[in-house]
Amino acid sequence: MTMISRSFRHSHLEDLQALLTGTLFAALGVLLFKQAGMLSGGTVGIAFVLHYASGWPLGLLFFAINLPFYGLAWRRMGPAFTLKTLCAVGLMSGFAEGLPHWISFSALDPLFAALAGGLLIGAGMLILFRHKASLGGLNVLVLWLQDSRGWRAGHLQAGLDSLVLLTGLAWVQPRQIALSLLGMAAINAALAINHRPGRYMAT
């Protein structure tokens, strides 16, 4: 039994590539959302709202908003999860600020931005979840509740995301709100279908 468990354990190199790949996917999805004037859920969504309201850098806001959640992560999810999440949040913040300088869009269909952006964010979060990391904030709360209570991460995230989305109504047009809902549905569908307790055995 011990030999089987070890064979499924991720190496440090595998964790590193997962952190880089997962945050890059998520940051690309966030860039599509931003270019289309959309919102997202979780701490990314809170950062979006504050960004639209204040004009402050999205990546900096995302990093700052996550700071209060590391105490919960350390107590409930352990030091390894917390350190990986801290690295993921730092990478995500850096990519969020760097990607607009590295990629530009001459044309971007909003519907495509919603669907593709949502799937990219969902895939990025899934990669991080499977390597015992997250994008911090509400993701930490969602993962803890799934592990401790058995609540499905995708369903719980959907409810919390809806609350975050409502706060953006003062700065985002109704059409962008509708697109944001579509994008968030894509994120949460990817998580609800693919991230279930016991389905993925590597640690």
Image: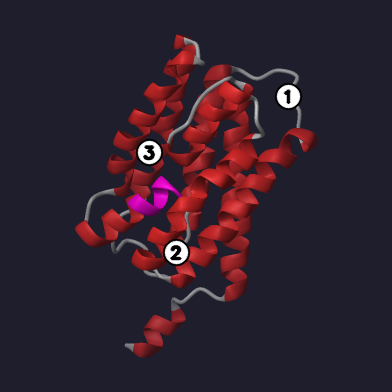
Q: Between tags 2 and 3, which lies in front?
A: 2
Q: Callout 2: few (<14), some (14-19), or many (20+) C-alpha neighbours within 10 Å? A: some
How far, Cα to Cα, is label 2 from label 1?
33 Å
Q: Does residue 159 appear left or right of residue 6 in this picture?
A: left
Q: Does residue 111 appear left or right of residue 24 in this picture?
A: left
Give whichever of discs 2 and 1 has the lower sequence position: 1
Circle 2 SS class: loop
Furthest residue to the right?
A: 101
Residue at the image position 46 percent from the left and 58 percent from the top: 70
Label 2 sits on residue: 132
Span shown in magenta: 137-141
Label 3 sits on residue: 188
Amino acid at circle 1:
Phe
Q: Does residue 15 appear left or right of residue 95 in this picture?
A: left
Measured from the top left, where is residue 141 in percent x and y?
35, 51
Give whichever of discs 2 and 3 has the lower sequence position: 2
Q: Callout 1: few (<14), some (14-19), or many (20+) C-alpha neighbours within 10 Å? A: few
Measured from the top left, where is residue 76 in percent x and y?
34, 65
Circle 1 SS class: loop
Give whichever of discs 1 and 3 has the lower sequence position: 1
Q: Please say whether residue 140 is one of the residues in the magenta stretch.
A: yes
Look at the numbered discs 1 and 3 and tell me whether their residues touch, using CB distance below 8 Å.
Answer: no
Q: Nearer the viewer, residue 99 or 186?
A: 99
